[in-house]
Image (cartoon, rainbow, N blue to C red):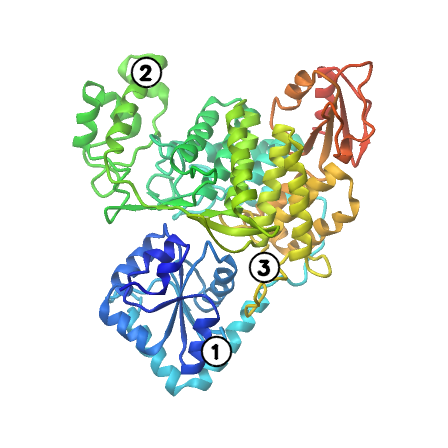
Amino acid sequence: MPNRLVNATSPYLLQHADNPVEWFEWGDEAFELATRQDLPVLLSVGYAACHWCHVMAHESFEDEETAAYMNAHFVNVKVDREERPDIDRIYMDAVQAMTGHGGWPMTVFLTPQGRPFYAGTYFPKEPRGHHPTFMSVLVGINEAWHQQRSEIEQQAGTLTEAVRRSLPSANEPLGDELIPEAIALLESRFDSDKGGFGGAPKFPQAPTLELLIRVAADWHEEGVRNRALRMLTKTLDEMAAGGIYDHLYGGFARYSVDPIWLVPHFEKMLYDNALLARLYANASTLTGSSEYRRVAEETLDYLVRDMRHSAGGILSAEDADSEGEEGKFALWSWEEFTEITGEDAPVMAALYGVTERGNFEGSNVLERYTAVGDITARFGISSAELEEIRSRNDAKLVTRRRERTPPAVDDKVVAAWNGLAIRAFAEAGVALDRPDYVEVAAGIARFLATEMTGDGRLLRAWRDDRVSGKAFCDDYAAVAVGLFALYQASGNEEWYHEAIRLTEAMIELFATDDRSGFYATGHDTAELIARPINLMDNPTPSDNSLAAEALAIRVALTGESDLESHVAGVIEAAGMLLVRHPTASGHLLGLIAVSPLRQVALVGEGQNELLSTFRNRYRPGFVLARAQPAGSPVPLLADRVPVNGLATAYVCEGFVCRLPTSSTDELMAQLDAHLG
């Protein structure tokens, strides 16, 4: 018989609706019951595409004996971290304070007041290494609850205080060398052989790559630009060659389990693919690389083909498992691969690194480590012939793969991640000259405006015409940034007005009273044991870095200098991170690197040549406004008039403009004047 989760909107919670565990969703009902019955709360947090969440569910939550013990001695609460990032953040701080590390599934034991007193991640059913079994943990917690209550209350107080102390504190002043020092620190941690930062498991760290591309494109010192560019291109090259990239379907897996980007953890997340597709698209215009263009297009096409809801929003994630096995959908045996590719098998095997032995548990993850020139030389064929062989055989491999059972899809739509997708499609549409991508971005924006907005309030998640909860700061900030990008890509002022509205609401709902940053939760939401202020990037840019960027773009378009104090407050609050941990603050550092944002205003008829000049390469330090024939409400365009009846460009900083020009050569010179 289904439990209470049968009415949830979250696919992750619905995965547990048939558990024998009497799960509650997070809310007053669970905590009031815990108070009445004097029971501890067992909080389990995960997400639909989480492999180890599935493992723990199969081992423990589907086990009748384990469930019976949980039901007798605990009030059990299940949370989707993607729907409730506030709960996830608060209690992940408790996990990290207690264990020194974090991860999912997250298992936290709480008092009926919501205070954590014991925490961990995955607990196995059977003994495994140094991990206690889940049942032994349950028994130990139950005994302690009844026999050592004072110690539990003391521990709860200590952990709760640790969670509250995780909010920002005193900071260091920032100097002019912040960006060069950050690049130097990143170089000291850079994997010069395979790109990226750190060892296994290896994550793309898109916000850090965002810092590199902004410095490479816009920093005033050539030496610093070149150092950033080397780290950026090496990482993009190696990721695109490795198995972390899906060479047949497009798109990136969450991370690789090794330090060389070869074997992925096969789940695919919308946020990773939106951030990385945008990076590759912009890097293609910065470097002229056709390979970066290919990766960007294949990734965005994957999102459109396999992850877009018919109503316009982009779905959250694709699972790592199919038919109960991780990666089964994407792996190839030597026998199947050679049977499909036939007489082309030797070339295709060399191209994709396929061997009889395999590179993952006897099967093959496709990779592209071998240089094209080495393959053409080995087989005596031209690069054009190789491409033709690859193309026709890829079609066969895709056909066979589509006959397999696909992974489950987490089919909820998350506002923040769709904001990232709006930006990715809008900027890629410009960078790659793909108007269809700009239209995809507009479709996402329309979906958020119609399906995920109630009483003017943005909502966090949507699934099957049902919404779940009020949006958080990252939702408002990411969508606002995305809409500003869509306005600049399309010239449609509808998106400018909506971005202004969202940033206004973001300030009202989330800003601290002293303008020292933005809370994750709104003033109009229920209180938790702490009110988090997120300053650290994780897979996605932090709430505060996105909020600061949204307001910096608004200021550049409107001249509302009073809003600059909000941006400055975020930077000041993040001071320690910026100085010491660039991999935890890359997005905000990237904003600082191109600040203050400069402006380009285009007015008059026939703007295409000037527009093409502005867009001929990635320019992260500029915002763009284009006057419509009937005039425009955008303040940057006020009093900007065509010169001699010609389309005219105004290049400005702080609304102070250089001489207007109708010359593409002069416009280029003005745009590049700050580069050393």
State the image quarter where residue 553 is shown: top right
Cα separation, mark 1 vs mark 2, equals 65 Å
Q: What residue does disc 3 label? A: 521
Q: Is residue 429 visible?
A: yes
State the image quarter where residue 633 is shown: top right
Q: What residue does disc 1 label? A: 155
Q: What residue does disc 2 label? A: 388
Q: The residue tagged with tag 3: helix, strand or loop?
A: loop
Q: Residues within 10 Å of mark 1 (few under 14, many from 20)?
A: some
Mark 3 or 2 closer to N-term?
A: 2
Q: Is residue 581 visible?
A: no
Cα separation, mark 3 vs mark 2, equals 53 Å
Q: Could you tell me the amino acid type at mark 3?
A: Thr
Q: Could you tell me the amino acid type at mark 2?
A: Glu
- Is 586 in front, or is 248? 248
- Is 601 in front, or is 523? 523
